[in-house]
Amino acid sequence: MSRQQRSFLFGGALAVFSWCGCLCGSGLAWAEFRVGAARVDVSPVQWPVLINGSMTSHAADQVTSPVFARAVVMDDGHERIGIVVVDSCMIPKQLCDEAKQLAAGRTQIRPDRMTISATHTHSAPSSEACLGTDADPNYVPYLREKLAEAIATAESKLQPARVGWGSGQAPGYTAVRRWVRRPDRIANDPFGNPTVRANMHAGAKPEDAIGPTGPEDPELSLIAFETLDGIPLAVLANFSMHYFGGERPVSADYFGRFCDELELALSPGSPVDMVAIMSHGCSGDIWRRDYLDPQSEAARSVEEFASGLSEIAIEAYRTVEFQSDPALSMLESRIPMRYRVPDAQRLQWARKVVDEMESKLPTTQPEIYAREQIFLDAMQSTEIVTQAICIGDIGIVTTPTETYALTGLKMKLQSPLEKTMVIELANGGDGYIPPPEQHVLGGYNTWAARSAGLEITAEPKVIARNLLMLEEIAQLPRRQFQQTNGPTALSILELNPKAYWRMHDWSPMEAIDVSGNECHGRYESGVVFFLEGPDSNRFSDGKVNRCAHFAGGRMSARLDLRESYTIVLSCWNGMPLDSRNITGWMLSHDRDDVVTSAGLHLGLDRRGRLIVQVGEHILATGEIAVPRWTWNQVALVRKPAAIQVYLNGSLEVECAVPTTAIEHLQFPTWFFGGRSDNDSNWEGRLDEIAVFDRALDSQALGRLFR
């Protein structure tokens, strides 16, 4: 959106006239849009240098590939904004603030109109103390100076320019690395407690794991700048992939190689020194290996990874439509945050462990996390920085944290601007902020430390503040996310279900019933959200279909069903077959916390076959084993005298209704994702749960299975 369009739309003609007059009087009226870009080598000059990105401290004495601070400065005659991305693991807020103040003294840019973020390469000099590594005392002041130099140099190159947005999809280059562990394979945390139900790279051992804890975000987005003659000036790219790894420090990882590839492709022999910048998208739970696809581990070097990603970026660049008069606006917010500090017992343990270290650096996980407890106890609270930027109809929001892909999707899908980029590890390095429901599952990303110590509510607070700032500067309301309806979803709705849970929720507030009957469900702890569901073409009209993943918790709802009803759902089992007597119960109707003689339960036996159980007795077992990690559609049809279960459209189980089962109709609560007594709960995904207050005939079922 141009400055004129935005002003007329929201201010009215009179307000625009007054505003323009004020700007004219101040000499700032409708100046042309200008951009400058620069790169500054920030490779260390004093050796050895400490390297961040590992649990324990280590150092390097050479440069494998140079590390840079890459900057772009924009000016529209009213606002001047500077964005810097530096090849570093993390940069603390204090260093960012000091570099901004230094740059402000050399430029016409206010400190709160600057963004400084890290690429998160794990092979760069340490500028922030974290876990077992301290900040390098020689490198920090050097980096501070270089960051200011990058901003000032970019400003000195301001020239008339145009800006545009490009976007591509790179699903083969990103995947979720945080996986749910089997309920019988829970691991201990560094404090000696069995709390690790989910952890990074648990999927590397498929026999121990269930599935990913969240979605990935495969979008590779670009904000492109060019001269008025069409010569590329700069590209600010954004992608959610943690880091590649494997290179000796000091190195820029794939981030630097991507920039080199893009510059070479877009400006060969150009008279303009084009600058490519790769910013870090929301990658707190992301890496490059898809543990659900063994073929994804095919040999691919960091060079091949960067080259393939740059090819996608080049294709996206070719679709960019440039505009020459975007309005610039920016807001910054500083949010008070509490740390999750240790209680007296843990603090006593931590001090004992640290005392026994005799002032040495920690070398084991218990030592590392004992020292972190003492740091957290001393700090107690902090203040984190978030920002929102508008460049015409393009939005940018920042987080100072290692942010999950789901969190980034929440902001993108609700942003008032459809073209929105989320840059993490900006203006600080405040550690992981898992969505609140992820804390229940434990794991490295949740262990209290400077690397993950913010309060449990940090994630929703960051989202709320960023969306409010975007609404204010875009002068538009946020968008409301709603799963689109594909042909099968429409067929379900046309059959007038009593309840229909699309399971596309992204928080544990409630399972939204889209039938119009407001029969909303309730999620328990132990459920994670917004993973990819079944057949997006059938259910979501080509958009990514979303679902919930059950990891010990259930979804429950109150339903008044009589002697005839139908329940249709899609299921994805994550448990290895033969790992326990019952692979998992997907559906249950009984009194809460018990199994009565009247309760009705549907699940998979240890061989993955459908089973129907009433009370403690299995009435019928299917013949087909449902493969692990595959989507299947199941329908339970209850008639006054019979129960039928369909698997992917074929009748798989049929049995008579015992007289004891009549009583279960009196129970008000239905459970999905587990049994009424929480025995052998479902470990995997459920989606598209539809309930009908009648027994559907074969013709109606055919519409749903087609």
Image: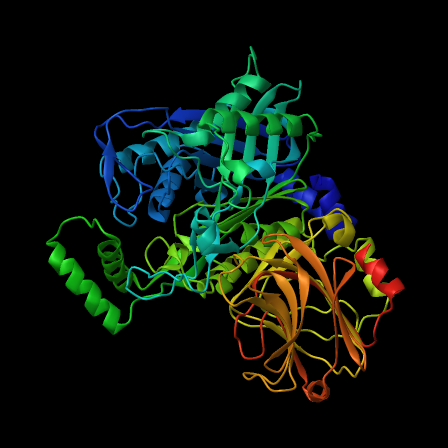
Residue 473: x percent and y percent? Answer: 62, 50
* Residue under the image location 80 percent in, 81 percent down: 641
In the picture, residue 643 is in which quadrant?
bottom right
Residue 572, image x, y percentages: 62, 57
Query: Which quadrant, please, contains the C terminus?
Result: bottom right
Q: Residue furthest right?
A: 699
Q: Nearer the viewer, residue 236 or 283?
A: 283
Say how the picture is coloured.
rainbow
Figure check: 703 above or below 418: below
- Answer yes or no: is residue 91 visible: yes
Is 699 in front, or is 560?
699
In the rendered image, residue 243, in percent from the top left (x then y), is placed at 44, 38
Taking 648 as reference, is 26 above or below it? above
| Residue 660 sits above or below residue 101 on the image | below
| Rendered residue at 31%/44% (across/down) | 128
456 with respect to 485 (left or right):
left
